[in-house]
Image (spheres, rainbow, N blue to C red):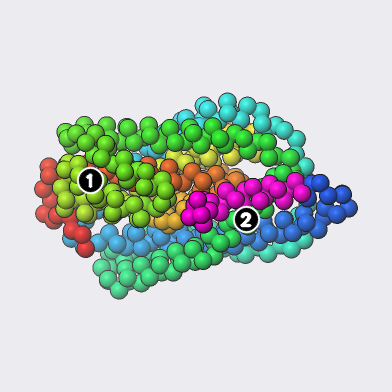
Amino acid sequence: MKNFLRSTAGKLIVSIFVGIAIGYAVKALPEAAVSIPLQILLVAKHITSQIILFIVPMIIFGCVAPSIAGFQGNVTKVLGLTVGIAYLSSIGAATLAIAVAWFLVPVLVSGAAATTSTALPDPIIAMNFPTMDTMSALLLAILIGLGVVWVGKKKYADALQDFQTMTLAVVKNVIIPILPVFVAANFALLVLQGKLAQMAVFLPAVLIVIACHLLWLTLLYGIATVYSKRNGWNILRNYVQAYLTAVGTMSSAATLPVALECMGRSKTVSDKTAGFALPLFCNIHLCGGCVSELFFVITTYYMLYGALPDFGNLCVFAVLACVIAIGAPGVPGGLNMSCAALVGSVILGGQDIATFFGIMTAVYTIVDGFGTAANITGDGALALITDAWISRNNPDTSPQTE
């Protein structure tokens, strides 16, 4: 229990209850005494959100560019295949989430978004940090990554890897510590706005998201079985230990040794392919995260605005979010943090993202263990497809673990 409370998800759960308690405490104060604690909450939310959104382009560049730059050497064909099927799996999972959410979210919310709310004043301290546009950061990351591949200079790839290490250190030492403050302030303000009752919609939403994870894994292993003409169920039944481990660790990297052990027990994919494919997929394949992100984006939007987001914008967001997923940082809620500014520009059209992102962060991070479990389990299906492709096409180069 102590270890869980020290984890990011545990801290966020505690921060939700702390924020709610603070909100009701402020609400119980005499009207004349409300302004000071209200402004403290508004300033805390504003400053933490500005810091997070300022760092997001750095996260996108620092994770996507090194991932692309690493795709070099003598395994180009296999790397192209693995990246391609990882993206197709993520976009397929996102499509499933959109289809399910489009029909179920209006039923789940069932008018909750129409409840009245209290308008809040602007914070007395406003610190708006200029930052790079999300799309510009993504395009720059792709071009720099490809440029390093084309030039073939290992020192540039190493420099990008060092920058990624720095980026993850910033996430660990800056973003992760301020997330509980950000979430607590958001939930306190939700209480003061009278919107807390709407949050009940997320309990069934979480259960539906987990069901979507399991449905996508079933489809993915079915596709892998048909393509490879091997028994994908043999891998899936051996992956139970990896799935449960990932739920607890919320980290594909931390679960990788268990996944390799599970794959070895299945004896369905060659050790050489597994040793190459699984470490790669655990960094670029986020099918479970894409399901969670798209479903909760739609749910949060409907809860706050009483309508579904524009379908065209949602499709654009899904395509771009799945690109970002390839290089999203391996921390709890990493994909959600990387997509924060993208939600603001594509889904919200420039509207205030702080409240939206605060809700998304809390819910997404809490369920992130199940998303990670779906990611790591889905890697087994993609490794099966990769091994079958290699055996059929017999490319000039074989996967290597360097």
- At horizontal 67% and vertical 53% (from top left) the residue drawn is 185
| Label 2 residue SS | helix
Q: Which residue is tagged 1?
A: 263
Q: Is residue 351 above or below residue 108?
A: below
Q: Is residue 140 above or below residue 9?
A: below
- Say what amino acid the circle numbered 1 marks: Met
Is 259 in front, or is 75?
A: 259
Residue that extends furthest to the front in the rendered view of this protein: 1
Would you say 149 lies left or right of 111 here? left
Instruction: Check whether the beta carbons of the residues at disc 1 and disc 2 lie within 8 A of each other.
Output: no
Magenta-span inclusion, residue 17? yes
- At horizontal 19% and vertical 34% (from top left) the residue drawn is 231
Stretch in magenta: 1-25
- Say what amino acid the circle numbered 2 marks: Phe
Magenta-span inclusion, residue 122? no
Would you say 361 lies left or right of 245 here? right
What mark, if any, has residue 382 been given in the picture? Answer: none
Q: CA gap, disc 1 to disc 2?
A: 40 Å
Q: Which residue is tagged 2?
A: 182
Does residue 193 appear in the picture of this structure? yes
Residue 41: quarter of image: bottom right
Would you say 201 lies left or right of 267 here? right
Residue 208: give x, y in percent of width and height: 48, 32
